[in-house]
Image: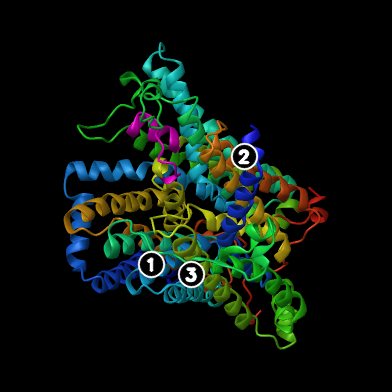
């Protein structure tokens, strides 16, 4: 009974963290002479007030969920993937190129190919830091940050040059964007709203990732590496390969998010020079969603919807009560800080408790972010 | 092409390259202190943005640049304090809490910018202060000694940081806490106090880095104006192998390439600037690969310290 209460408390921690962040936000709003009730009211209204609002929430949740699923895999292996932004961009670029190349092919085929291309693009962009970490011991936080910057520059270069919309190339304005995809290539919509099948794909993938992590040997190995790389090695797990696999899959899911963003929402690639112009910071917010869902693929679904709602509601709040939607970015940051800080209570209790077997799914890897063991130790693998 | 290699252009590239190194130096030297004591602060970019805004807003409203500078340092220090509490007392995972602080600074600076200023304004930033005598030296004087005061400060910080880390008791404490906190603790060094000090110092310097952009180099504030410079600063610490002089080399690499690319645009040379900007990032990865087997990170980096263990 007691342990059940405890695990209930654990799963409520992110919710408490959110309330704490919203409370801090309310204080900030009061200091800025805004009525917090009015602001949060507009936010709620914007996120859930109508069918359209709810559809928009799910549209926003889609890339967060996909990136978040990738984060679940990577973080479970104790690999910190900060490269979601770059992986989304590369996935988006490859997918767009598919649509621009095969203009004669049937729509369903192009969509499948494009999604596959996005998957591959993200896998490459995640796999490189994976290889660098596993075989050259380059810290993945740094390499993924670098890969983000490289992806942004690559996108800017391609959209200003080789991939620019031929119509824009002739104009003086030269808006850095690709040509629009054919109407036949758009992801089908689910209702008379902007909600597209990309959301369903993300939900299915959440179940797939759950099965992968907890019902397959590969998933077991990935988690084992995250829990204890040394023991895993003695247990015969090829630690380095599993690190590469985790980052590769993590990147692939983010790349998929990029492809779906292009085929479901934008119908073209366009850049404002920054990463967030294309991703809407989903590469970072996906981390927030995954943490909020306690790095559990199924838990990440409601978390992604929640943060999608915050983002959509923030736009409404900006229009109605003139509070910049950036407030939500700041609150997301606070939520992350509160969630990772609250882990200490869980850890303390676990130390006191003798057995942890029932709680396995809720346990985070102990040395998340620790470096790969030194080469002498790695020799054994 | 002859134009590119004319003396004026080369001096121009070097002069602005030195100038542009400023924010990298403040932020990366600050981060070096933190990492040497075992704490990875990924929130540098957020601290810079909030510092940049604080400096700009205070300078804009009071018309006093020094007050702006002070405001940036206080804001950076407060964010550092938050990071210190979360990582030292609550043992939070450093990489992820850094991302949290980054998002907080990113959102908060934009929020305040839109609510308090509304539009992009400009200030008269720190003027060029030529160093007496030295600025008269041909070429060298022009490149190094006709800059503004924050540029000098950034370059002076390098030997100061080297001296503190390697030649003082404080530096010894910082390094021992980063290498072997248990041993340091048993010798009576307070691991928590040292880490608080380095993280707050790092935050203060990140705030200065932001201020150097908003009231000395660009003299405007815009949302997300650092565009990830703080993350590069973190990478520079690895690039420079946790040494002040190495950080300087990395900072100059990035700033010189940026400066070159800006001049290429001015001179209308048809080299895709996006590709040029990409090079330092690729080079950083290559350097990390090449040096990682020879250079060792502080052993306790990213590991929380628990006295009770």
Which one is earlier in the sequence, the residue at label 1 or at label 3?
1
Q: Secondary structure at mark 2?
A: helix
Give the left or right position of residue A137, taking residue B77 as reference.
Answer: right
In the rendered structure, which segment of residues is drawn in magenta?
A257-276
User: Where is residue A252 shown, x and y percent of the image?
Assistant: 53, 37
Q: Residue B270 appears in which quarter of the rendering? A: top right
Judge whether residue B247 is colored magenta. no
User: Where is residue B234 shown, x and y percent of the image?
Assistant: 60, 59
**Looking at this rendering, what residue extends furthest in the top direction?**
A104
- Above or below, B224 relative to A63: below
Point out the frontmost of discs 1 and 2.
Answer: 2
Asked if the residue under mark 3 is in contact with the one under mark 1, i.e. CB atoms within 8 Å, the reply is no
Which one is earlier in the sequence, the residue at label 2 or at label 3?
2
Determine which residue is flagged by label 2. Answer: A127
Quadrant into which the N terminus of chain B falls: top right
Residue at (38%, 13%) from the top-left corner? A106
Q: Secondary structure at mark 1?
A: helix
Tag 1 and tag 3 share a subunit: yes
Host chain of mark 3 = A
Q: CA distance from mark 2 to mark 3?
A: 30 Å
User: Where is residue A164 shown, x and y percent of the image?
Assistant: 43, 26
Quadrant into which the C terminus of chain B falls: bottom right
Q: Residues within 10 Å of mark 1 (few under 14, many from 20)?
A: many
Residue A341 numbered tag: 3
Q: Residues within 10 Å of mark 2 (few under 14, many from 20)?
A: many
User: Where is residue A226 shown, x and y percent of the image?
Assistant: 62, 54
Asked if the residue under mark 2 is in contact with the one under mark 1, i.e. CB atoms within 8 Å, the reply is no
Judge whether residue A259 is colored magenta. yes
Q: Secondary structure at mark 3?
A: helix
Determine which residue is flagged by label 1. Answer: A17
Host chain of mark 1 = A
């Amino acid at each position: 009974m007691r342990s059940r209460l405890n695990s209930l408390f654990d799963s409520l921690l992110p919710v408490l963290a959110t309330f704490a962040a919203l409370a801090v936000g309310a204080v900030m709003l009061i200091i800025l002479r805004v009525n917090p009730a009015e602001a949060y009211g507009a936010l709620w209204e914007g996120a859930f007030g109508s069918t359209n609002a709810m559809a928009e929430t799910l549209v926003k949740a889609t890339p967060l969920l996909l990136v978040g699923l990738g984060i679940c895999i990577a973080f479970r292996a104790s690999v910190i993937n900060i490269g979601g932004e770059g992986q989304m961009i590369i996935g988006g670029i490859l997918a767009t190129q598919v649509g621009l190349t095969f203009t004669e092919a049937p729509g369903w085929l192009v969509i499948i190919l494009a999604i596959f291309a996005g998957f591959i693009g993200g896998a490459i962009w995640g796999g490189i830091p994976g290889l660098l970490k596993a075989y050259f011991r380059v810290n993945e936080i740094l390499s993924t940050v670098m890969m983000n910057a490289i992806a942004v520059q690559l996108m800017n270069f391609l959209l200003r040059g080789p991939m620019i919309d031929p119509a824009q190339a002739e104009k003086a304005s030269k808006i850095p964007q690709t040509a629009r995809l054919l109407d036949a290539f758009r992801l089908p919509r689910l209702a008379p709203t902007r909600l597209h099948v990309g959301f369903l794909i993300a939900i299915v993938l959440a179940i797939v990732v759950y099965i992968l992590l907890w019902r397959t040997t590969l998933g077991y190995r990935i988690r084992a590496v995250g829990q204890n790389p040394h023991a895993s090695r003695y247990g015969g797990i090829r630690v380095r390969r599993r690190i590469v696999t985790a980052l590769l899959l993590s990147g692939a899911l983010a790349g998929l998010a990029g492809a779906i963003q292009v085929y479901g929402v934008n119908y073209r690639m366009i850049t404002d020079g920054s990463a967030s112009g294309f991703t809407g910071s989903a590469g970072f917010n996906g981390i927030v969603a995954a943490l909020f869902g306690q790095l559990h693929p199924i838990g990440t679904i409601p978390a992604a919807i929640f943060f999608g709602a915050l983002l959509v509601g923030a736009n409404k709040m900006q229009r109605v009560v003139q509070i910049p939607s950036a407030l939500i970015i700041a609150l997301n940051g606070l939520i992350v800080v509160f969630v990772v800080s609250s882990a200490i209570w869980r850890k303390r209790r676990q130390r006191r408790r003798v057995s942890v077997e029932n709680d396995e799914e809720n346990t985070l890897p102990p040395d998340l972010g620790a470096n790969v063991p030194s080469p002498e130790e790695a020799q054994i693998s | 092409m002859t134009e590119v290699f004319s003396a004026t252009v080369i001096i121009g590239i070097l002069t602005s390259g030195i100038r542009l190194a400023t924010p990298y130096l403040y932020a990366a030297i600050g981060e070096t202190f933190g990492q040497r004591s075992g704490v990875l602060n990924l929130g540098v970019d957020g601290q810079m943005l909030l510092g940049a805004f604080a400096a700009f807003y205070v300078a804009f409203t009071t018309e006093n640049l020094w007050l702006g500078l002070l405001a940036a340092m206080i804001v950076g220090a407060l964010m550092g304090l938050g990071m210190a509490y979360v990582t030292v007392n609550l043992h939070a995972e450093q990489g992820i809490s850094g991302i949290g602080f980054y998002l907080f600074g990113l959102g908060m600076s934009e929020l305040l910018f839109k609510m308090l200023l509304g539009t992009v304004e400009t200030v008269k930033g720190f003027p060029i202060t030529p160093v007496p005598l030295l600025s008269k030296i041909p070429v060298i004087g022009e490149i190094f000694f006709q800059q503004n005061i924050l540029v000098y400060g950034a370059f002076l910080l390098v030997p100061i940081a080297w001296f503190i880390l390697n030649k003082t008791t404080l530096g010894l404490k910082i390094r021992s806490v980063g290498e072997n906190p248990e041993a340091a603790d048993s010798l009576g060094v307070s691991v928590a106090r040292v880490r608080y000090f380095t993280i707050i110092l790092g935050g203060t310097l990140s705030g200065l880095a932001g201020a150097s952009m908003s009231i000395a180099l660009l003299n405007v504030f815009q949302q997300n104006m650092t565009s990830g410079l703080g993350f590069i600063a973190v990478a520079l610490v690895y690039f420079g192998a946790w040494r002040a002089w190495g950080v300087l080399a990395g900072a100059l690499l990035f700033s010189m390439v940026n400066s070159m690319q800006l001049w290429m645009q001015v001179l209308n040379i048809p080299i895709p600037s996006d590709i040029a900007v990409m090079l330092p990032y690729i080079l950083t990865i290559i350097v990390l690969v090449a040096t990682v087997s020879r250079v060792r990170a502080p052993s306790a980096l990213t590991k929380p310290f628990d006295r009770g263990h």
